Image (spheres, rainbow, N blue to C red):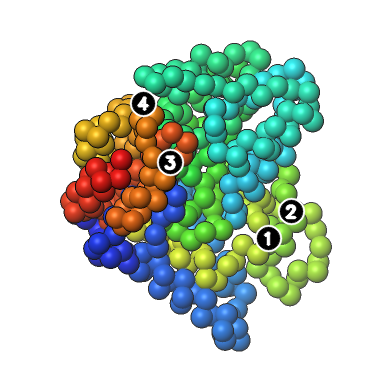
Amino acid sequence: MECQRHLFDIPMDIAYLDCAFMGPLMGKVMAAGREGLSRKAQPWHLTGDDFFVDETRLRALMGRLMNARAEDFALIPSVSYGMAVAAKNLSVPPGSEILMLDRQFPSNVYIWRDKARANNAAIKTITRKDGQSWTEMVLAAIGPQTSLLALPHVHWIDGGVLDLVAIGQKARVHGAALVLDLTQSLGALAFDATAVDADFAVVANYKWLLGPYSTGFLHVAARHHKGTPLEQCWQSREGAANFAGLTDYHDQMAKGAARFDMGERSNFALLPAAIAAIAQILDWGVENITAQTRQYTAHLADLAVGYGLRAESEPIRAPHYLSLRLPSDAPENLQQRLRAHNVFVSRRGDRLRVTPHVWVNKADIERFGAALKASL
């Protein structure tokens, strides 16, 4: 791939290396959102069909992105919403264990702590040391006592990547459910829903999918399609497109995962923007994005190691994700110092998280190196 900076509103003197914090919106995504929002300015042009067209396109795009069926996706506003749906529809027997990673993102923690307390189950937190992979530690922890694994694909702090196919296979041997947060991977790292066979997989759009905030997806395995939703959205009933018959109340839910959709899913501004973003990612090809970001993180790691930071290598870390361990004498305000040089990254504890995407160019990488040298 060539650098795609021309599609973004990123000035040439800005080195934005923080996609794991927030992915910027492309110009075409902004335009799609504005056009969609403008429909609400003159609502007499809207018809009942407008409540269903965009969500149908989105489910189809997500099916292509994750090697899944369109009917396996629900539209949700956040990871926490999707995790709440999963928790509502999975059982955790008393005395069993829920497995999760040390310092996992809170949206995939609190709901399971509540679930464990309510069912007299235990939370088992998995840790790892430098040089160990999350995959080997998770596989070693799965056993007859495991009822559920709540995991990311890529750890949001250290960038460690998990082999979800292998983990899913062992989980099923022990009858354990698998619930995933794909927010720090989907769009930059391939994910095959059929091969992994998770029970529920959640993703927020605003990071690597380069979409708008407050939009996301819940992939639901077919075995859970008869489950219980969090709310009674009118569009989640069969026949909802027939506005004249909406008060012919009935209990028949929409087919597939649509029963789990959030209320007011037909957001006329956000859904067109999400469509434009995911369509562009599919046009680039996730494999191409992975290859390009792998080159970026390799160059960035080489520069950082030269200034005393430590970087893990693949396959322990994800190719698009660089989490640099800082030296003990690194200044507390290192992130702010780098910002003063127009270099934007995140600091998470003792790590500097550097996460480039397709807009990065050679000048950005050089600016990072120079700013790091000046700031340490």
The answer to which image quadrant residue 199 occupies is: top right
Residue type (three-letter) at the residue carrying disc 4: Ile
Considering only order in the chain, which callout, 2 or 4, is on the residue closer to the N terminus? 2
Considering only order in the chain, which callout, 1 or 3, is on the residue closer to the N terminus? 1
- Residue appearing at x 24%, y 42% in the figure: 373
Q: What SS does tag 1 mark?
A: loop
Image coords of residue 325 (percent x, y): 37, 31
Q: Which residue has dot 2 on it? A: 231
Considering only order in the chain, which callout, 4 or 3, is on the residue closer to the N terminus? 4
Considering only order in the chain, which callout, 3 or 2, is on the residue closer to the N terminus? 2
Q: Which residue has dot 1 on it? A: 263
Q: Are marks 2 and 1 in contact (CB under 8 Å)?
A: yes
Q: Are marks 4 and 1 in contact (CB under 8 Å)?
A: no
Q: Residues within 10 Å of mark 2 (few under 14, many from 20)?
A: few
On residue 332, which mark appears?
3
Q: Which residue has dot 4 on it? A: 316
